[in-house]
Amino acid sequence: MINFNLSEEQELLKKTAKDFAKNELLEGAVNRDENKIWPKEQISKMANLGFLGMMVNPKWDGGGMDTISYSIAMEEIAAVDASAAVVMSVNNSLVCYLIEHFGSDFQKEKYLKKLASGSNIGAFSLSEPQSGSDASNMITTAIKDGNHYILNGTKNWVTNGINSDLVLVFAITEKGIGHRGISCFIVEKGLSGFECGKAENKLGIRASDTCELYFDNVKISEENRIGEEGEGFKIALSTLDGGRIGIASQALGIASASLYHSIQYSKEREQFGKPIANNQSIQFKLADMAMELEAARLLTWKAAWMKDQHKNFSAIASMAKVYASEVAMRASTQCVQIHGGYGYIAETGVERLMRDAKITQIYEGTSEIQRVVIARSLL
Ligand code: CAA
């Protein structure tokens, strides 16, 4: 049986996230973007609302919510500030998820509780300068030394890299056996030999931080290895399946904001003696945006539902991410077009949507990689 109604709790959560975004994120979003200011105060308020560990079991100080609830909250936050949304997404669907599902009780007690309550922020570090889409082609090593590992290498494109308290790092523990030689570690900030690079100067999501990480003989305790040696790559890929629902939801937020601003502006803006919304050329753009947004949301919620039902959701999560991110890109581009010259300047706030949309087609697996995942599941 199919039911498209949100539950009472989900409706309440949607309103809470929408009000929070309007009251706490909206003001200053353009300034934070322009000046690359990480939303520290706003993230701590999001933590107080329980937005940083939404799906984690309450036993580990999380919200115990389902993935559709997470998607709803992500969409509302991203509609106003996609930078704050990616901080939330990485902490929830990559870091908390990974430790909860693959970590030991010791790791959950020591790290997950702080991450789920939002008193700590986490980052996820898989990519390296030479290995992006081909993620298993990494060269960072973690060589066993008694009951420790010695970590050496360089990682890049790490969201929350600078502002996090710990990073989940994937490294080779056994060379020459491909992905079966990769393991996953919790690496705390402040360890000797662990340095962050400068914040990248990005096209969009400029208020979130992205940096390189450098490991020079960093000593990591064996108890910080997640899972068994050699399980790291599968842990990374199965975590990314859920992460892609988070990014699809971020894209939904950008698309819904694009539609909202397009409707408002086209009703207000008059040319040739009438609102531009009276023109069929504008109406068709609005209709396409609404139609595609609806389809993207249904796909994303289906992926979230399948994850919660413990079905294989890898391909549908990829479908949701690739489709929602393309919808966000089209909708935000049309939004700028509808605003004309006013859409092209920062103060109006809509060019930010277009810049922010682009990354949703790239991180947590490019659109091309999502299509690889989808095609493999078909074949
Ligand atoms: N879950 C669990 N295991 C999986 C899996 C999944 N979804 N997909 C594949 N596997 C398993 C396979 O079964 C295989 O195991 P066996 O050898 O035992 O059969 C193993 O993992 C390797 O799989 P493949 O041979 O298919 O691996 P591949 O090297 O061909 O790569 C890929 C597959 C889909 C291209 C993968 O590399 C990929 O997703 N690449 C993109 C990486 C990515 O998303 N990076 C984003 C980094 S995070 C980020 O963006 C930054 C941020 O901070 C937001």
Image (cartoon, grey):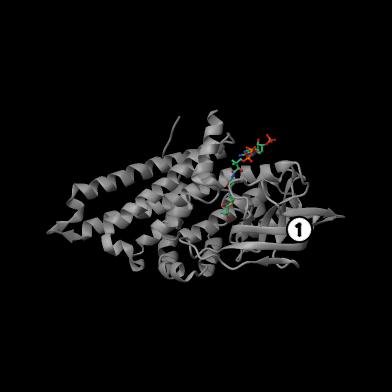
Residue at 63% in and 47% down = 135
Q: In this view, does 337 lie above or below 236?
A: below
Is residue 53 visible from the viewing direction of this image?
A: no
Camera-side residue of 230 and 43: 230
Q: How crowded is mark 1: few (under 14 residues within 10 Å), some or many (20 or more)?
A: many
Amino acid type, label 1: Leu
Q: Name the quarter where the C terminus is drawn.
A: top right
Q: Residue 267 in the image: x percent, y percent?
A: 22, 56
Is residue 155 visible from the viewing direction of this image?
A: yes
Q: Is residue 169 above or below residue 227?
A: below
Q: Give the quadrant of ligand 1.
A: top right
Residue 151 position by quadrant: bottom right
Query: In the image, 12: left or right of 127?
Result: left
Query: In the image, 229: left or right of 163?
Result: right
Residue at 54% in and 68% down = 40
Q: Residue 340 in the image: x percent, y percent?
A: 27, 60
Residue at 62% in and 43% down = 237
Residue at 23% in and 47% down = 283
